[in-house]
Image (cartoon, grey):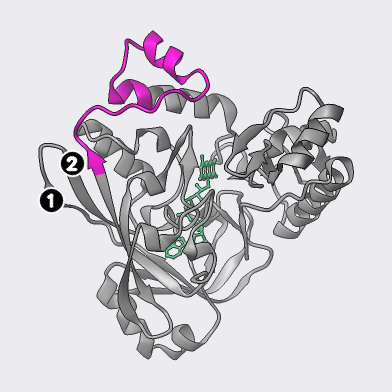
Amino acid sequence: MVENFYNYPLKSLNTIGFDVSARRFIKAYATQEILQLRYDKDFACGKRLVMGGGSNLLFTADFDGCILQPLLQNIDIESSTSEHVRLRVGAGVVWDELVRSSVERGWYGLENLSLIPGTVGASPVQNIGAYGAEAKDAIESVEYVDLDDFAVKRLSNEQCRFGYRGSIFKQELKGKVVITQVTFCLSKRPRYNISYGSLREMVKQLGGENLCNVRQAIAATRRSKLPDPADLGNAGSFFKNPFVEKSLAEELLKKHPAMPSFASGSGVKIPAGWLIEQCGLKGARRGSVGVHPKQALVLVNYGGGTGCDVLTLANEICQAVNDKFGVKLEMEVNVV
Ligand SMILES: Cc1cc2nc3c(=O)[nH]c(=O)nc-3n(C[C@H](O)[C@H](O)[C@H](O)COP(=O)(O)OP(=O)(O)OC[C@H]3O[C@@H](n4cnc5c(N)ncnc54)[C@H](O)[C@@H]3O)c2cc1C
């Protein structure tokens, strides 16, 4: 049965820790319950938001509408061969629980995405990625409730139009669907992806290639680089790494020979953290919010800050990077 709450506090439901509330908060445990919401005028016709764990959300005010949190908890084996296993996983499963259980059962494909906060239902939305892997590499299809006609629909991997930190769910279908189930295809044959940074060396030091060692190496790297929201409120990388035209990258490299850059398709990717650091903003503090002193891509809430404070700081950063490099930064975080 759906659970309804009114004037629901969201402080513990957004990892940056803003003290906001939702006029109405709905927890749904089954697709059928979400389908029934078509008869609920407040939800079907009013202002609404679907959320998972709140690790990629920036609330700028109390939410004067309905927030729906799908909490479907299944991890079902749909099919299994000697090569692959196909898993159908409920939107409410904690992402790292899925990764942990896959690693423990010897299934390859999610281990590089260890410790990413949030839920399975959000994983296709921005095609979560880390350490040379992306969710799209393992996602076979995504099932959702269309909030226009309250019908259950399914998109194949190709139809999801996954890209760097993006998908159809961040474009045409933004705000129009409730993702309920994600189907993953994982390999039973060893398949490591450890060429990123010093991963291979770390795995070697841990005793060699196996899934647990890869997960452990990723976890150690993440813990050394990213602030834990339990200690310091943050929403992970605040900006996407920008892709610029080759000609602009060449021009910038002449002026800044130390600039890290990675050719990718027709463009060149530049780490946003490096650009922010070069503007002297790493560690900058504006009242209760700031840029993390060790990771310029992460904006933090030292306590008592607001979403508007963070947006003001984000605008200052965008302006500074644009003025110095002529590069436009785009936010990765979803502003509500
Ligand atoms: C410390 C930290 C580290 C992070 N590291 C990474 C990283 O390495 N790589 C990476 O890609 N991301 C990273 N993130 C961002 C975040 O973990 C991911 O974006 C994650 O997928 C968000 O999941 P969530 O359940 O918290 O989604 P939420 O923050 O609740 O929602 C995010 C977006 O997805 C939508 N959404 C959520 N669930 C559903 C659903 N069931 N149906 C439809 N729409 C939905 C929401 O409306 C919103 O637009 C990090 C965040 C933090 C705080």
Instruction: Count the labels in the image.
Output: 2
On screen, residue 123 above or below 233: below
Please state if 48 lies on the left or on the right of 98 as rendered: right
Dot 2 lies on which element?
A: strand
Query: Could you classify mark 1 by the number of other residues whose Cα lies within 10 Å: few (under 14), some (14-19), or many (20 or more)?
Result: few
Give x and y (percent) for residue 116: 46, 41
Q: Is residue 155 above or below residue 38?
A: above
Quadrant hosting residue 290: top right
Give the mark nearer the N terminus: 2 vs 1: 1
Q: Quadrant of the C terminus?
A: bottom right
Give me the disc on residue 69.
none
Residue 46 at x, y = what percent? 53, 85
Question: Where is residue 70, by image quadrant?
Answer: bottom left
Q: State the residue at coordinates (42%, 80%).
A: 147
Look at mark 2 in the image and give the residue it sits on.
84
Residue 71 percent location from the top left of the image: 34, 62
**Looking at the image, which is closer to me, 178 or 69?**
178
Q: Are marks 2 and 1 in contact (CB under 8 Å)?
A: yes
Estimate the x, y position of residue 125 in percent, counting from the top left. Answer: 47, 58
Residue 287 in view (yes/no): no
Q: Which residues are magenta?
A: 186-215
The amino acid sitting under disc 1 is Ser
Left or right of 59? Residue 183 is: left
The amino acid type of the residue labelled 2 equals His
